[in-house]
Each structure stands twice: as C-alpha cells, then as structure tokens.
C-alpha cells in the first residue's frame, strides 16, 4: 500500500485513438507478442531512450495509416500499429544499430 | 454477464479492430518482436527481467493509492478539502491524477450523520485514475441492484454497521459523473501525518462500503 505507484499516467491513461485497449478497465493482450511489444516501448521510454510523447505521436500516425482506407475496418489491430510505430521510432533513433531492414 | 459489460464508456471504443489473425500472421509478428527484443537486450538498452515486471505494473498498479492520497490531503488541509468538494476533478488533478475515466469526478463526504456509497447500476463506471481497476464484486449484478434497494444490508455484508440515525446515500456513477467517497477520518489519528494516514485509507472506504479503520 505504501509503495509508490509506478505506472506512468501519461502512458496508462492515453486517450483517443492511442488509448490502450482495455475491457472493464483491464488491459487486453490477445497474444504474448503484444505484451512484449508493449513492454519494450514502455521500458525504452522509462530508460529515457525516447520521450513517451514521441512514441505516442508515432503510434497515432501508425493507427491513422492503418485506418486510411476504411476507418471502420483498419488494416491492422492496435498492437500491430504499436509494433510498426516502435520499429519506425527505433529506426529513426538508430537504436538498433546501423542495420537497415 | 450482461449486455452492459461492453458498454462503450467502460473502455475506449473498439480495443480490437481485428481480433482474428492467422497463426501464421501471429508467428511473423512474434518474430518481429523477438528480433527487436534481442537486439535491444544485446545492446543493453532493455533488461529481460525489467520487461516482465513492467507489464505487471501496468496491468495491476493503477491502484487505489492515488485516491488514498487525495483523501489524506483533504483530511489534513481544510482548504484542499473545500476545493475537492467544490470541484473534484480539478482538485484531484492538483495532485497529478486524472485522465481517462477520471473526468467529471464528484466527491461526497461522509459525516457522523451521512454515509455515502457508490455504485454503477448500468455497468461498472469507476474512477480508474484514483481507484485503479474495479473489484469484481463492484461489477456484479448482485451488488449493483441490491445496494440501491437495501444499502444497509449490503453494508452489513461488508461488515459495516451503521446507527439507524445515520442517513445512507447511494450514488449512481455513470459516464457523466463518477463518485468518490471522502470517508471520515477515524478518531485517534490526530497525531498522524498525511503520509501515515494514506496507509489506512483503502479502496472499499472510498467506494463507501467500509469505514476507514486504524488497527
């Protein structure tokens, strides 16, 4: 009870299109890779490799991209867009080294 | 449980646009994650153990601690309490809490004459930023219907007995208004500091099914 809250509100409580998928308040991960993709992005932000708003911006763009053709039926799910955003940001920040792929 | 479980204000719209991916697609996606993960681990930018703990935190840690801090502050700071009762959303934001499902907060104060208890009869509207995730019983049809009809017996189930002279008020949270109970500060805690008080304030007392006890 006396332990500090560790979840960062700007991550946990993102609003709008970038809001974390939840059902009755609980986070929803359909596959294990989604959980791992979530953890990677949050961990890198917590370690200061990028600002959370940079990732969020990338995520919003990534979601918008997937909704371009038809907002009702986006081309990919939330965590697929999340992964695409993470990959794009890592490339931009050159955090994966010089490999370009 | 009921059709209301998928009520739109209970969660951001459409968590999953596409819930059916083929095993093959999933494998490909998992491989992409593994590739990034191992590169980042190799470079020392992330740590395997930390990653696992992190998910735990986000899944479980939006706890009622924030609400406890709000209550403790109101107990020790009369001006803050005044602001909290006048405009709860703003006063809660002063402590840095807010956001999704924390808009339109209203705080109702317990007194020796009035005891407040909160429910969401429609589904499970609940102020996440201050109380975290709702307990299972809060979402149960039994609690949702019974507390409106016979709050005293529900409170008794939680071990809370009230004098007949105490008026019980039931507040129905919705997408528009989310209630938080400001419990009474227990007698004999005058010497405690704000941070110590926080320890005693639990979730159930802020929903209103229990009183704050120092034991």
Image (tube, rainbow, N blue to C red):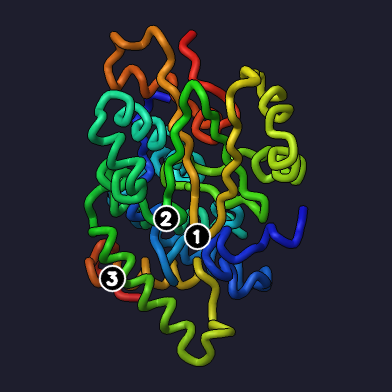
Same chain for the residues at labels 2 and 1, yes or no?
yes
Regarding mark 3 in the picture, which secondary structure is present there? helix
Q: Which quadrant of the figure has residue B204?
A: top right
In the shown orientation, is residue B135 left or right of residue B191? right
Task: State which chain disc 2 sits on.
Answer: B
Q: Which residue is mark 1?
A: B176
Q: Is residue A43 in view from this perspective?
A: no
Identified at 55% across, 69% down, the residue is B13
- Could you say where residue A59 lies in the image, as x and y percent from the top left? 37, 70
In this rendering, would B17 be left or right of B40?
A: right
Closer to the eye: label 3 or 1: 1
Query: Mark 3 — residue?
Result: A91
Q: Is residue A83 above or below residue A5?
A: below
The residue at the point 39 percent across, 40 percent down is B50
Find disc 2 in the rendering and name its residue. Answer: B104
The picture places residue A22, in percent across and down from the top left corner, at: 55, 57
Q: Residues within 10 Å of mark 3 (few under 14, many from 20)?
A: some
**In the displayed image of the protein, which residue is found farthest to the bottom?**
A69
Q: Chain of mark 1?
A: B
- Residue B187 in percent (x, y) is at 41, 10
Mark 1 lies on a secondary structure that is loop
């Amino acid at each position: 009870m006396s332990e500090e809250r560790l979840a960062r509100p700007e991550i946990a409580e993102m609003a709008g299109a970038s809001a974390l998928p939840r059902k009755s308040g609980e986070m929803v991960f359909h596959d294990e890779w989604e959980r791992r993709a979530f953890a990677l992005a949050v961990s890198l932000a917590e370690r200061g490799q990028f600002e959370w708003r940079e990732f969020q911006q990338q995520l919003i763009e990534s979601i918008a991209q997937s909704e371009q053709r038809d907002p009702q039926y986006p081309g990919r799910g939330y965590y697929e867009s999340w992964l695409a955003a993470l990959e794009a940001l890592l490339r931009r920040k050159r955090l994966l080294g010089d490999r370009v792929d | 449980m009921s059709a209301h479980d998928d009520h739109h204000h209970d969660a951001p719209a459409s968590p999953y646009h596409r819930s059916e991916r083929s095993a093959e697609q999933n494998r490909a996606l998992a491989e992409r994650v593994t590739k990034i993960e191992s590169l980042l681990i190799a470079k020392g930018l992330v740590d395997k153990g930390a990653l696992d703990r992190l998910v735990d935190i986000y899944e479980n840690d939006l706890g009622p601690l924030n609400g406890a801090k709000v209550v403790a502050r109101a107990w020790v700071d009369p001006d803050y309490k005044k602001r909290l009762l006048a405009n709860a959303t703003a006063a809660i934001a002063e402590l840095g809490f807010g956001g999704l499902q924390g808009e339109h907060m209203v705080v109702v104060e317990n007194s020796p004459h009035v005891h407040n208890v909160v429910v969401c009869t429609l589904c499970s509207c609940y102020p996440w930023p201050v109380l975290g995730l709702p307990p299972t019983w809060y979402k149960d049809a039994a609690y949702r219907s019974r507390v409106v009809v016979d709050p005293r017996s529900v409170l008794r189930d939680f071990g809370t007995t009230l004098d007949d002279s105490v008026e019980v008020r039931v507040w129905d949270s919705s997408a528009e208004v989310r209630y938080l109970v400001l419990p009474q500060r227990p007698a004999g805690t005058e010497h405690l500091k704000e941070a110590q008080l926080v320890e005693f304030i639990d979730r159930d007392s802020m929903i209103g099914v229990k009183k704050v006890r120092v034991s």
